[in-house]
Image: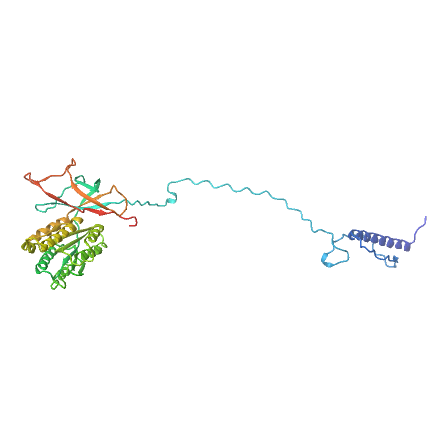
Amino acid sequence: MTTMTEPSAARFLRLQTVLIGALALAVVVTITAPAQVPATPPAAQPATPTVAQPATPPAAQPATPTVAQPADQSSGSEAGPNSDNGTIVIPKKKEPEEPPPPPAPAEPKIKNPGGETYSLRVDVPIVNLDVSVILDKNHQFVPGLKAANFLVLEDGVEQKVDRVRIGQTPITAVMLLEFAANSYYYINEMRTASVGFFHSLRPDDYVAVMTYDLQTHILSDFTNNKDVIAESLNSLTMPGFSDTDMFDALYETLDRTSRIEGRKYILLIGTGRDTFSKITLDKILAKIKATPNVTIFTIGTGALVNEMRAGGGMREMNYLQAQNQLKTFAEMTGGLSFSPLFQGELPDDFAQINNSIRNQYLLSYRPTNPANDGSYRKVKVILVDNEGHPMQMQDEKGRPLKYSVIARDGYKARLPVE
């Protein structure tokens, strides 16, 4: 057996190392080579023999395998296009969806949730009637009547009276005086009547003073100061016109009083004649019907003058027509009308007016016809006894007494927009 010398052994080891490196490079080239072969093969190059150079032999190291890295496409290397399809993304395992939360338990149903307050409004029409019951002989007020003693007929249909009470309250009145240069006797009677009503006022009564001839004049607004009222009456010394436009004056007065709350009264003192009013009789009657909570009392002047001129003719017809107009105004509103011949009758007339104003029965009922159609409803009030028969009144000696039931003859129903 031939034994190799030391130099021979070293050369063998270097050759072995070179062969292993060449083999590894060949493997790498084979893996990273492009799959396609160029159409024109390159010219065969003569193999260059590897010449082993003498060198100091390195220490023996274990061979480190070389891992082929993919070439960068942007580098433009000669290795050809990158055949790698990118990083393989492994899809993440889908986690199971969480079940939806269970619905909240239903709240218990209660009648008034949250303790809130609700209100319901029902518009039920109520009719209030001011009714006076006065004896015809002495004009005294008849007290002590109950709800069952009043029979109210609305358009002929009986109504149920729910409540009856007696009211004694201060009054709010307008003194509407005819002050025209037509006759001294008329002016003198008007003054006497207005002063008589002035003395019947109470401290808590509110009164306004108005006069009319061709126009309407306001002498004083509503006041409870008697000095102001007296000063207004004392200023009636020299009339300006002889015309008496009563319809226009009454229409304007009704229009002004309709803006005041509560019950109002108009004391109309004059002859009742009308000369050049723009408002006709039909329009003033319609205005009276459409104005609620107003009662008209009238005192006609000139009764004595007309009596002295009796004998028929056009003058007497005009006077009778004028007095009839005043009476109609009062009856439509539940008031009273007087035509005194002498001044001595005025205190009794004003006493009756005061009894009618300050002592009244206030009747309240719900009409059987609740329609808000703006129609005019005719109302009639009758006194009945416990058995439903017409009431009979007697004095201490058993003699029958006549009485009068004073109330409005109707009212106008509301409209839907009111």
In this view, the residue farthest toward the right is 1
The reply to whether residue 262 is visible in this rendering is: no
Measured as percent of width and height from the top left, residue 416 is found at 30, 48
Q: Is residue 339 left or right of residue 414?
A: left
The reply to whether residue 410 is visible in this rendering is: yes
Nearest the eye: 299 or 168: 299
Nearest the eye: 189 or 241: 241
In this view, the residue farthest toward the front is 313
- What's the residue at 6%, 56% (across, down)? 305
Q: Quadrant of residue 207?
A: bottom left
Q: Quadrant of residue 176?
A: bottom left
Above or below: residue 147 compared with residue 174: above
Q: Is residue 16 left or right of residue 152?
A: right
Nearest the eye: 79 or 157: 157
Nearest the eye: 321 or 54: 321
Measured as percent of width and height from the top left, residue 152 is found at 19, 41
The count of marks equals 0
Which colour scheme appears in the figure?
rainbow
Measured as percent of width and height from the top left, residue 296 is found at 16, 52
- What's the residue at 39%, 43% (across, down)? 113
Measured as percent of width and height from the top left, residue 224 is found at 16, 57
